Image (spheres, helix red, strand yellow):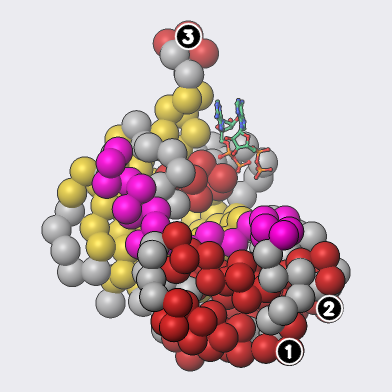
Amino acid sequence: KTVLAVKNLTKIYGQEANQVVALDHVDLELATGEIVMVMGPSGSGKTTLLQLLGGLEPPTEGEIKLRDGEWQQFYREPQISHYRRDTIGFVFQFFNLISALTAEENVALPLILAGESKKKITTEAKELLQLVGLSERAKHLPSELSGGQQQRVAIARALIHKPALLLADEPTGNLDSRTSKDILDLFVKMRDQLGQTILIVTHDPYVATYGDRVVLFRDGRMVDEYRAEQIVGQ
Ligand code: ADP
Ligand code: ADP
């Protein structure tokens, strides 16, 4: 079942003579509970894809469809901020936690900002910290956590409002290989236990082996696609 689909997604930066077509009429359909890896050389449009799907930038052109809804023009202000808040969770290479807040407070932050009740916030933050295996560190500050633990907190924070799509930009780019594997196993757990749909941008072929599907970008276009079976078989 489709959780989110886009078509003709296009982003052109700049004006007239120095225009850059960063993304060129991309069609992409994401099924519930799949992990999709986005690969491609530098400048191929991966970051732009993530920014558009995440509602951080408006596309030049494109349509979007959520679950079994209708195709519609991709969101603009003011809907795009609702979309960003309700539909998308974000995980970054450098964790982006708030250093003055504990692990639990970082996880709870999206719900606090949404004005949820204190009871609901505490319960759900604790549940998610448990799911990512960090219950014992709930009261620790980011500076008291390892890189892998910080990324777990960031993943819990990204999932607390149950986003349709979790987007991750080089989520293991700042971690050693052992810790990277733990984080990738955690993404798999989120897929298997929550049915979470996850899209990960990576340049690391090892990371890509964790995908159910790998899509390859070049010059703003999706030029190839592999299924997990094909990748493992190589
Ligand atoms: P990747 O993430 O695959 O390296 P990007 O999406 O960052 O690729 O970039 C795709 C193309 O769009 C590149 O040519 C890049 O220079 C250009 N680009 C990206 N962001 C901007 C921007 N804000 N302004 C102008 N050009 C941009
Ligand atoms: P990555 O390392 O993820 O491929 P880039 O280094 O291509 O990312 O770009 C990082 C950010 O800088 C992008 O999110 C984009 O918005 C911006 N950017 C990239 N290329 C340009 C450009 N030519 N002009 C202005 N901003 C750019």
Q: Amino acid at mark 2?
A: Arg
Circle 2 Cα neighbour tier, 10 Å, few/some/many (<14 / 14–19 / ≥20): few
Please give the name of the residue rendered at 67% of the width and 60% of the height, measured from the top-left corner. 97
Q: Which residue is mark 3?
A: 17
Q: Nearer the viewer, mark 3 or mark 2?
A: 2
Quadrant in the rendering for residue 59: top left
Left or right: residue 188 versus residue 58 is right
Visible residue check, residue 118: yes
Q: Amino acid at mark 1?
A: Glu
Spatial CA distance of label 1 from label 3 is: 56 Å
What is the number of the mark on residue 136? Answer: 1
User: Was residue 64 drawn as part of the magenta stretch in this picture?
Assistant: no
Q: Residue at x 41, y 34 (%)?
A: 11
List x then y, in percent, for residue 172.
72, 65
Residue at the far top: name it. Answer: 17
Tell me the number on the disc at residue 178: 2
Left or right: residue 17 versus residue 129 is left
Q: Which quarter of the figure is the N terminus placed in?
A: bottom left
Q: Which residues are magenta?
A: 77-100
Q: Quarter holding the C terminus? A: bottom right
- Residue at the spot x=32%, y=46% of the render? 80
Nearer to the camera, 215 or 88? 88
Q: How many marks?
A: 3
What secondary structure is found at the residue carrying circle 3?
A: helix
Q: Is residue 25 above or below residue 64?
A: above
Residue 218 appears at what percent x and percent y?
A: 55, 43
Quadrant for residue 32, please give it. bottom left
Q: Residues within 10 Å of mark 1 (few under 14, many from 20)?
A: few
